[in-house]
Image: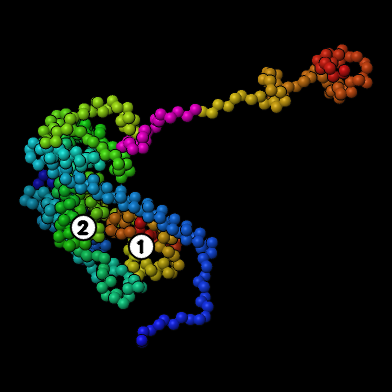
Amino acid sequence: MSDESSRELSRLWRILRTVKQMCADRGYELTEEECNISLADFRAQYADESGAPQRTRMAFTARPTDDMVTKYTPLPRPAARNNAADELVPQIGLIHVEFANEPSVGIKHLKAFAQLLNEKVYWTGIYVSQAAPTPSALKIVPSLLPTVMEIFKEDDLLVNISRHELVPKHTLLSAEDKKRLLERYRLKETQLPRIRMDDPMARYLGLRRGQVVKIIRKSETAGRYASYRWTI
Amino acid sequence: MATKVPVKSILKQPAPPKPTDEDKAKAEKDRHNLNLALQHAYLIQHQKDVQAQILTSIETLLDLPSSPIFTAQDANTLISLVQQFQPSDLDALAEERRIDGRCGYALCANAPRYAKLGESASWKLSKGASDFCSAACARKSLYVKTQLGEVPAWERDPTRTLTIKLHQDDRPVEDQAPDGKSRVSGRQVANDGNDLALERGEKTASLRPAQVMTDRIVEKRTVAHKPLSSLSNTAVSHTAIEGYEPRRTALSGKREDSDDSDDDDNDDDHDDKMAEELFDGVDE
């Protein structure tokens, strides 16, 4: 096996591991072994005979866990309490992750991916590209809503940022938790501090506009310190 | 006869509370705010619609030309779709076509030079040139690009439409179309001063952003020099101190107070005489 392809292999191994850890952190059903796959196993599964990694083989789909489903279920609206049964559709579903084979990504690639998401009725799609897609290709993403398409660059996924020492723990609050928090502090959601949707940790957790995330930091004086951020 | 007649009370109806001036003003303000918010919302929606339209135009232009040599229909599609573009959109189109393995000029079916050169294109060719199959195509694309309006399509004057012309080499095909109108050369049009003014962004309907240069010359207000002394209108001499002319520099303090009581002061001093000569007419 050439040096070039073995380096590429270990690069992709780290990327796949980060993506799976990210999905597990969001609450999708992935086993511990899948998230922490060893390089030898990765080579056995995803490399072809010559030892070069196959990006198309790395695509995977995951189901949300029950915890995640309850977290993403909206609260019943006071007006529609009578027929609450059909109101409470959890705003989450299958996730599909794909890795781009081509070095540069244009409109056509993302269109094809969007069509795949639409056909197979995936709720969320993650597209991992080798280089940043063209600006006009990125304009497709908002037109797909409510289907969520997230685009990550391979370089951004080499390291799992949430495991870094300086990154505090972020946890998403469910709709009920959010309501309780706002009642407890007698706040409107607009009075909370904010976090941008393109914040690296917000992208990692796939936060949506209006959600509240709890951030637990270490504090020298208080031990732990929790703060809340409203996603904008 | 059993129809129910609605009972009408004989008691005086309590009058609905009259809207006070305060309420009226508040309602008026609310309506005004709502209208303002709606207006801005419509503007943003319009902008989004136009952007989506441009995106679909780029998508259609990706698949041109339909045959190895472009047809008149292809040329017409290009001309009509490209009207909404800003120059940057045409660059985006070239990049998209390069990724798709076509020449950046929408009427050319060849592969871009990037396909042959690969990664080395970034240093062998200038930036953007690798999107095209040849320098000729790059020039043709530039010819179209220079005609595009720099003002985004959603801010343009809807009454004015842009007429885009293809490069000379591609035009005869267009002319063979059944409704071959007499061709007006680009130069001839450019001679028109009106069009030039429009092109420079000096008119509101222009497709270029307002530029720094305007033909309106604003004269600065010139302020005439005024002497600081309000006593005399004459120009201030060089001896004046802050506009005040010191009158008797040679006089001491003692002489100063004798100045006004000059009549009873009989001893004729030399200095005094000098002073009296200076201020002639004080004694008389």
Q: Is residue B252 above or below residue B174?
A: above
Instruction: Say whether mark 2 and mark 1 are on the same chain.
Output: yes
Question: Residue at label 1?
Answer: A212
Quadrant including the C terminus of chain A: bottom left
Q: Is residue B47 left or right of residue B182?
A: right
Q: How is the image coloured?
A: rainbow
- For this orientation, the residue located farthest to the left is A49
Q: Is residue B187 above or below residue A123?
A: above
Q: Residue visible at 93% across and 16% down?
A: B267
Looking at the picture, which amino acid does disc 2 mark? Gly
In the rendered image, residue A163, in percent from the top left (x then y), is placed at: 29, 57
Label 2 neighbourhood size at 10 Å, few (<14), some (14-19), many (20+)? many
Q: Quadrant of residue A172?
A: bottom left
Indicate which disc residue A125 carries. Answer: 2
In the rendered image, residue A74, in percent from the top left (x then y), is placed at: 31, 68
Indicate which disc residue A203 carries. Answer: none
Q: Secondary structure at mark 2?
A: strand
Q: Nearer the viewer, residue B251 or A130?
A: B251
Magenta stretch bounds: B202-219
Q: Residue visible at 34% across and 68% down?
A: A175
Q: Examine the structure image and report whether residue A30 is included in the region drawn in magenta.
A: no
Looking at the picture, which amino acid does disc 1 mark? Val
Q: Is residue B70 above or below residue B236?
A: below
Q: Nearer the viewer, residue A44 or A143?
A: A143
Question: What is the chain identity of the residue bearing mark 2?
Answer: A
Give me the C-alpha separation between circle 1 and circle 2. 22 Å
